[in-house]
Amino acid sequence: MSMNAWSETVSGMTWGWVGVRGTWTGPDADHSMEEMAKLGVNWVAIALSALQETPQSTEIPYGESPTVTDDEVRAAIRKAKSLGLKVCLKPVVNVANGTWRAHIGFFDEEVPGEPSWREWFASYGKFVKHYAAIAQEEGCEMLCIGCEMVQTDKRETEWRNLIAEIRPIYAGLLTYNCDKYQEDRLTWWDAVDIVSSSGYYPIDDWEAQLDRIEGVLAKWNKPFFFMEAGCPSREGSPMKPNDWSLPGGPSEAEQKRYYEAMFGACAKRDWMRGYMLWDWPAKLYAPSEAADNDDYCMYGKAAASTVRDFYVSGQKAVVGEA
């Protein structure tokens, strides 16, 4: 797919993370998605997680708790569609011991008796293809086949083989969500339909990073959007928006300032297709708690109006007071 073959504007949000079993249906979940839709959202990334035990485990038990059930996944997709939203289903592997998934990895060459890339990709393939079938059956417009799996990115042959196995199962658009700073390091972007990444770039570094990404897109001739992007409402977070544990007090102003800078910089790039902002939980905090909440969700915070104005305006730059 060329850069011009898919020209949609993704005014999106990531919903439901981390996908804990029992939280994706019922009044709270319905309320959450209905409130999200009020921000001018037209796409939603429905993001669920399965847990492998350690970074070197080769089994992904996606049928077990705490992963949401298939019925919950289908219900969330149907709820989004009832609100007129397009859906990207995003199954993600996490590590139960707390290690970031980017560090899942094995020896480059197989060694007898040691866990291997071959074993892991066999399990990961079953995981992704399971949700690919659900995405096809439920009419999801897009499937994200992986997220921020930096150590796997170099396994080009395995990724190409997996994508070839997914295509007969799922007929929609495929993307891979590479991590920040990795857009120019993948060698298999031609195998997916859309390039996407986690755009957690420092507030003062947007122009340089967008210049770099622009070079990637010129090479691969693919459309692009940020499958993740956002900033906690916390002091200091605009300089390290990917750090959800950064110390600092709650600050709606800092989150709003970050969104204005990101939207302003990206709106000047005609190749930018949009965002699946991070993030919107299946159960929202009360609006009265928004000022004390220092997480990514912008519900009830100053940045919510920034996002709404930007999305409703067709992603034209929104300039407000910092």
Image (cartoon, rainbow, N blue to C red):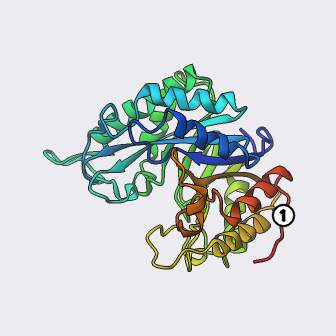
Q: Residue at x 69, y 72 (%)?
A: 206
**In the rendered image, which quarter contains the C terminus?**
bottom right
Compare residues 186 and 9 and report the one nearer the observer: 9
Count of residue discs: 1
Q: Is residue 235 visible?
A: yes
Location of residue 137 (image quadrant): top right
Mark 1, other Cα within 10 Å: few <14 / some 14–19 / many ≥20: many
Badge 1 marks a residue whose secondary structure is: loop
Give how far across and how far down residue 92 sits, in percent. 44, 44
Q: Residue at x 48, y 54 (%)?
A: 148
In-image side of 317 versus 57 (left or right): right
In-image side of 39 versus 156 (left or right): right
Residue 218 drawn above or below residue 175: below
Mark 1 belongs to which amino acid?
Answer: Ala
Query: Which residue ends up furthest to the front in the rendered image?
Result: 288
Give how far across and how far down residue 190 sits, in percent. 61, 43
Give how far across and how far down residue 320 sits, in percent. 82, 72
In-image side of 7 versus 302 (left or right): right
**In the rendered image, which quarter contains the N terminus?**
top right
Compare residues 73 and 206 and report the one nearer the observer: 73
Residue 233 drawn above or below residue 284: below
Residue 81 drawn above or below residue 262: above
Compare residues 46 and 199 and report the one nearer the observer: 46
Q: Residue at x 50, y 24 (%)?
A: 134
Compare residues 53 and 111 and report the one nearer the observer: 53
Residue labelled with disc 1 = 317
Q: Is residue 227 visible?
A: no
Q: Residue at x 74, y 58 (%)?
A: 307
